Image (spheres, rainbow, N blue to C red):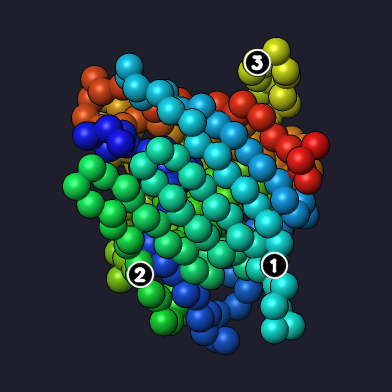
Amino acid sequence: MPALRRPLPLCLVVTGVLVMLFSPSVPASAQIRIQNPSIPDDEQLVYSVKSGTDSWIVSQRFSLHTENGGSWYAFSSHSPEVDSLLRLDPVTLFPRSSEVVTHARDSIIRRTTEIVKASFVAKADELIIADDFASLPVILRGFPWESTKAAHLVTLGSGGFGRSFSVDLAVAGKESLTLNGKTYECWKVQIGVGGFLGSIMSSIMGKSLYWFSTDPTHYLVRSESPTGAPGSARQVVELQSRTVNGK
């Protein structure tokens, strides 16, 4: 293992365990509706990641599980230094539970978090996500691309302060990308801090960009995001291969 941990992309790291128990008083129609686009069982995705002079490979796998009369998606992600597992609601794709294990030269660390209640009421233009943005690219596979072009992202655990400033998502439209000789039709997404503060930060650091396939399952094709202070390298994630049931 290398001595220094490379920063993993937001879309490929799961940083906690989240057990969601939604209050019955929260109307499901209050927030932007996320609907599983029929992600296939045993879907495997391989990505290349580049950050400055560093590069590595991340492999992901979706698999559908049924037990005790219920079902859930397992989303696993593996890189040279981080292994993660996320359990997703089969309908909303929201994390039910997750864990991340980091492997360093001097330690192996498993990080977990448990949420025992979530009663946050979203507004009509808001999209509730977990207490970090790690699961966002997975949730966005179920985004209503045709009907919704913008959303304010609200994180659980903000204690109500999530609205004091906004993290805004904007669908910039469709765009074609060619990677490894293959052309993908994609939905392009921009994510950044909104308002006056956001305009300043975006001019200095730039926004995070994501490209999701217009294919009905809307898998991530590419992402580009800042990694730190102004002038630092942007991290680029690109799809290398996608198979379903090994094909």
Of the two numbered discs 3 and 1 in the rendering, the one whose residue sits closer to the viewer: 1
**Residue underneath mark 2:** 113
Of the two numbered discs 2 and 1 in the rendering, the one whose residue sits closer to the viewer: 1
- Mark 3–mark 1 Cα distance, whole angstroms, equals 32 Å
The x and y percentages for residue 229 are 21, 30
Name the amino acid, label 2: Thr
Q: Which secondary structure lies at badge 2?
A: loop
The x and y percentages for residue 120 are 44, 74
Name the amino acid, label 3: Asn
Q: Which mark is residue 180?
A: 3
N-terminal label among 3 and 2: 2
Q: Which secondary structure lies at badge 1?
A: strand
N-terminal label among 2 and 1: 1
Which of the image's four quarters has the N terminus? top left
Image point (57%, 44%), residue name: 60
Image point (48%, 44%), residue name: 78
Q: Are marks 3 and 1 in contact (CB under 8 Å)?
A: no
- Mark 3–mark 2 Cα distance, whole angstroms, equals 38 Å
N-terminal label among 3 and 1: 1
Mark 3 burial class by Cα count in 10 Å: few <14, some 14-19, many 20+: few
Which of the image's four quarters has the C terminus? top right
On the picture, is 76 further left or further right than 118?
right
**Residue underneath mark 1:** 65
The x and y percentages for residue 243 are 73, 37
